Amino acid sequence: MGPLVWRVIGTGSAVLAGIVANKLVTTVWKKAGRDAVIDPRDPRTPWKDALAFAALTGLAAGAAKVLATRKAAEYYQKSAGHLPKAMQQGDA
């Protein structure tokens, strides 16, 4: 396995995790009784709601990306016998 494989696996899993986290936050937001549609950039959205939604989305997406990247690195390590070169050099 080479650097290109790691870029596909690592980046792909992180992007997918971010999308799933965003959908999850939107679903939780709706179930919590908040507005069904929220756009933090919309000036009609109250500041409190916009900041809460943005913070929740950022936290969920960041955590999901970290988990997905770690799992992808574990898979890569099991398959190739070593961590991706980018992680071996410390610039993952």
Image (spheres, helix red, strand yellow):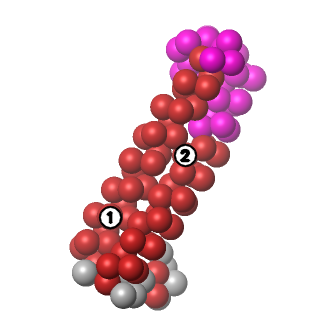
Most foreground residue, 59 or 79: 79
Give the amino acid type for the residue marked by disc 1 in the picture: Ile
Asked which secondary structure carries label 2, the reply is: helix
Residue in view at x 32 percent, y 84 percent: 80
**Magenta stretch: includes residue 52:** yes
Residue 32 x, y percent position in the rendering = 68, 18
SS for callout 1: helix
Q: Position of residue 62 (x, y in %)?
A: 57, 51
Residue at 53% x, 14% y is: 37
- Measure the C-alpha gap from mark 1 to mark 2: 17 Å
Quadrant (top left, top right, bottom left, bottom right) of the N terminus? bottom left
Q: Answer few, some or many: residues within 10 Å of disc 2's Cα (few below 14, many 20 plus, some between 14 and 19).
A: many
In the depicted view, which residue is nearer to us: 89 or 9?
9
Q: Is residue 12 above or below residue 45?
A: below
- First in sequence: mark 1 or mark 2? 1
Q: Which of the 4 quarters of the picture holds residue 82?
A: bottom left
Rendered image quadrant of residue 67: bottom right
Queried whether the magenta region covers residue 1, the answer comes back as no
Q: Find residue 32 and name its label.
A: none
Q: Label 1 neighbourhood size at 10 Å, few (<14), some (14-19), many (20+)?
A: some
Q: Height in image: 25 above or below 1?
A: above
Question: As shown in the figure, which amino acid type bears the numbered disc 2?
Answer: Ala
Is there any visible trace of residue 22 in the rendered image?
Answer: yes
> Which residue does the numbered mark 1 point to in the structure image?
9
Q: Residue at x 36, y 75 (%)?
A: 76
Q: Residue furthest right?
A: 48
User: Does residue 2 sit above or below 37 in this rendering?
Assistant: below
Tell me the number on the disc at residue 61: 2
Residue range (magenta): 31-57
Q: Residue furthest front?
A: 78
Residue 90: give x, y in percent of width and height: 51, 84
